Amino acid sequence: MTRFERAVRTTQKVIAALPDCQRDWKPDASARSAGDLAWHICFRDVWFLESISHLHLDLERHRSDKRPDTFVAMAAWYGENMAGAMQQVTALTGPQLLTPLVFFGHSQAAFLYLLLTYNHSVHHRGQLSTYIRPAGGQVPCIYGSSADTAFAGV
């Protein structure tokens, strides 16, 4: 299993740990709600990989998928769609991965956006993990045991 695949599984655990009754909970008035932040991770991570596989980063392209109703369903949606998107990316050739893509006025090789996708996911997963306990959930293992969950290995 690759580091990226492990990160996806960890993100799924974080999303699934949120209590559904707290979808609108947020730590501050200016923060995203738990539901909005979880969906942002799911939607944008899949969007990034699919866009890279199409060699075009178009923020106007939106998925028609309806947001799942529960955090567990959202985590499952994320895992399934990330797996498909990762397959698309791994099918790219070396020259395709060197294709310059433009995102917010910056141009760099497509493969460098894979790192951006990974960092995006880890960054927002960290934010979301801080929502879990105050929202009434139990924090899963992320890089090791948490105060709520003992590490059981990979």
Image: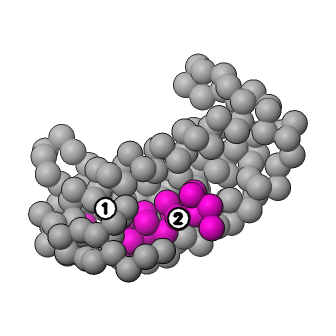
Q: Residue at x 27, y 77 (%)?
A: 150
The crowd level at tag 1 (other Cα within 10 Å; few <14, some 14-19, many 20+) is many
Q: Where is mark 1, residue-wise?
A: 35
Q: Is residue 64 above or below residue 9?
A: above
Q: Is residue 154 magenta?
A: no
Amino acid type of disc 1?
Answer: Gly
Task: Look at 14% across and 72% down and name the residue there.
Answer: 136
Give the side of residue 120 with respect to residue 102, left or right: left
Task: Please state the horizontal and vertical placement of residue 74, each as a whole percent of the image.
Answer: 43, 71
Q: Residue 109, can we see it?
A: yes
Question: In the rendered image, which quarter is residue 97 located in?
Answer: top right
| Horizontal relation, residue 66 to residue 20: left or right | right
User: Which image quadrant: the N terminus?
Assistant: bottom right
Image point (48%, 74%), residue name:
154
In the structure shown, which secondary structural element does the residue marked by tag 1 occupy? Answer: helix
Sort mark 2 into few (<14), some (14-19) or many (20+) by Cα contacts within 10 Å: few
Tell me where residue 148 appears, x and y as whole percent: 20, 75
The numbered mark at residue 6 is 2
Task: Considering the whole magenta stretch, tell me its main secondary structure.
Answer: helix
CB atoms of marks 2 and 1 within 8 Å: no
